Image (spheres, rainbow, N blue to C red):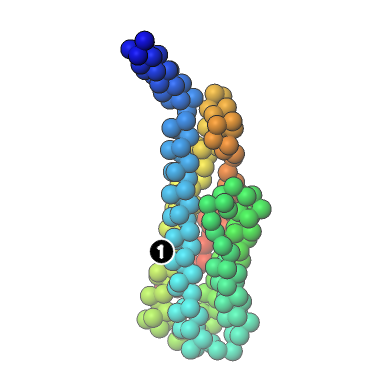
Amino acid sequence: MGSRISVFATIAITVLFVGLSGCGYNDLQGVDEDTKAAWSEVINQYQRRADLIPNLVATVKGYAAHEKDTLEGVVQARAQATGIQVTPETLKDPAAFEQFQKAQAGLTSALGRLIAIAENYPNLKADQNFRDLQSQLEGTENRIAVARKRYIDRVAEYNKMVRYFPTNLTAKFLLHMEEKPNFTVADEKAVAKPPEVKFN
C-alpha cells in the first residue's frame, strides 16, 4: 500500500512539474525578474544624473548668478524627479509610471535650458570643472537611453508572455500578473535628443 502511494505521489509530482514548465510558470518568473533588473538600471542612471546636478548648478551660478530663474528651475525639477518614491509597485501602476516619466522629462528640459545659457558666458564654457561636468552629463544621458532601451525590450517580452496563450492563463490565474507600463514613443523622442552638452 505504501509503495503504491509513493508511486502515485511520484507520478503526481512529475505531472505537476511538467504542467508548470509547459504553462510558462518559471519563464514568467524569469522575465518578471528581468524587467525588475532593467528598471533598477534605469533608476540607477537617473540617480546618477540627479547627483551631477548640484555641482553643475553651483558651477553655473559662479559665472551666471543672475540666471536665477533657470537655476531655480533646475533645482525644482530635480527635487520633483527625486521626490517620487519609486517602488516595484510603480511598474504595476500606469498612473505612477506616467508621473515618474513626466518628472524625468521636466528635469531633462530644465537641464537643457541650463546648458544652453552657457553659450552666453565664454568664461563658463572654458571652465574645466564645467567641461568635466558637461562631459559626465552627456555620458549619463547616453547611459539613460541605453538603460531605457533595455527596459523597453524586457517589458515587451514580459507583456507578450502575460498576453499570449497558454502562459496568459498562468499569469492571470496562478501568478496574478498583469501587463506593465512602458515608455512611450514621445518619451523616446525626448531621450533621443538629450541636452546638448558639447561646445567644441
Relative vertical location of residue 62 with respect to residue 172 in this rendering, above or below: below
- Front in this rendered view, residue 181 or 190: 181
> Which residue is depicted at the point 58% across and 37% down?
176
Against 119, is 42 above or below? above
Q: Tag 1, which secondary structure?
A: helix
Q: Is residue 109 visible?
A: no
**Residue 71: x percent and y percent?**
57, 81
Crowding around mark 1 (Cα neighbors within 10 Å: few <14, some 14 to 19, many 20+) is few
In the depicted structure, whether residue 183 falls above or below residue 8: below
- Determine the residue positioned at 40% across, 21% down: 13
The residue labelled by disc 1 is: 139
Return the x and y of residue 190 as percentages of the image width and height.
57, 58
Left or right of 131: which side holds 104?
A: right
Any part of residue 96 in sight: yes
Indicate the quadrant where residue 33 lies: top left
Return the residue nearer the eye: 84 or 189: 84
Give x and y (percent) for residue 134: 43, 72
* Quadrant that contains the N terminus: top left
Which percent across, then down, holds residue 155?
52, 42
Say what amino acid the circle numbered 1 marks.
Gly
